[in-house]
Amino acid sequence: MSTYLKIKNLTKRYGSLTAVDDLSFEIKKGNIYGILGPNGSGKSTTLGMVLNVINPTSGNFEWFEGKTTTQEALKKIGAIIEHPNFYPYMTAVQNLELVCKIKGISTSNIEEKLAIVNLSDRKNSKFKTYSLGMKQRLAIASALLNNPKVLILDEPTNGLDPQGIHQIREIILKIAQQGTTILLASHLLYEVEKICSHVIILNKGKKIYEGSVKAMSSNYGYLELGVMEQQEKLINFLKNHDYFGEIEIKNKHEITVMLTQEVESATINKLLFKENIILSHLVKQNSSLEKNFLEITQNFKN
Ligand code: ADP
Ligand code: MG
């Protein structure tokens, strides 16, 4: 599988603030990558560097295995990193024609790209009559005009209503299905979970997780356990058994404990019963990306 983008030890400092900190990852052909992280974690700065609009402090990146210059490579990339900017009194078609003229590319793709973003029926309306969602979709059409190999989107659904958000997601998936590799930045976990195949999680500019979204969502889950008394005894038992990982005490009666292997609730109930620990509550939760994401970002706060 060919590597489209390779980032190595990329770092960006603004004075004493390190916005992107020794970041390395790779983007391979055909996948949908999400850069996920809270606000200020360095997502936009990372995208800015690989698009050559922000100069790295150190480290480097390489597009398309270094076979072309960055300048040439950027012609094969479509990107939306700012709010869409079009002429309000011109129609969608006229705006896209202008984009083609500026970029020196053929106008023959315009109709096809407007169809992909579901704007064919409004193609002759003036830009100023568009909703925010339509404006964003027009921006996507514009970024697709040169048939890019990679489409880069920064917070593509920001500010949109639920229907607008849904439309953008469907369109991104459709574009990916047609073979375009996608790199999107988002602070929304469920957005990345819904759209992406791979995720790079950033916190304070540092990569804290990289992998497939599937692998991250599927671990062994955790248990919510309740006891009337005997909490100390329960905790001691859990600490000394290798089914169990980290323990979180919620209150005098309730705890949660991470599972370190596949195990049934019934097995656990039996195990504890043998120890004379009587549970008032036992629920097994399958760990979600959300819990992982919160834990990961929590652990890296200081
Ligand atoms: P994100 O896109 O994840 O919200 P950014 O990449 O925009 O994060 O910002 C990362 C950090 O760098 C933030 O702390 C932000 O305030 C800081 N930052 C971004 N751009 C600049 C700049 N031009 N000058 C100074 N600090 C900046
Ligand atoms: Mg940003």
Image (cartoon, helix red, strand yellow):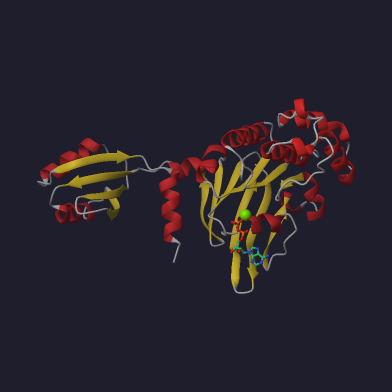
Q: Which residue shows up at 64% across the image and 55% down it?
A: 44
The front one of 183 and 262 is 183
Which residue occupies the extreme top position in the image? 121
Q: Residue furthest bottom?
A: 16
What residue do we see at 78% from left, 29% from top? Answer: 112
Q: Residue furthest left?
A: 276
Residue 291 at x, y percent in the picture: 41, 47
Q: What is the number of callouts on the image?
A: 0
Question: x, y percentage for residue 157?
Answer: 61, 42
Q: Taking 151 as reference, is 212 left or right?
A: left
Using residue 265 as the reference point, say whether residue 229 is left or right of it: left
Residue 197: percent from left, percent from top? 56, 40
* Spot occupied by residue 58 in the image (x, y as percentages of width and height): 67, 68
Above or below 42: residue 184: above
Q: Would you identify the image quadrant in which residue 137 lies?
A: top right
Q: Nearer the viewer, residue 70 or 279?
A: 279
- Left or right, 122 with respect to 218, comes to right
Classify 50 as above or below 171.
Answer: below
Instruction: Please state, as top left, top right, bottom left or bottom right, where the N terminus lies in the image.
Output: top right
Image quadrant for the C terminus? bottom left
Q: Is residue 30 above or below residue 14?
A: above
Residue shown at 90%/42% (left/top)?
101
In the image, 147 versus 212, the foreground residue is 147
> In front: 247, or 189?
189
Where is ligand 1, by quadrant? bottom right
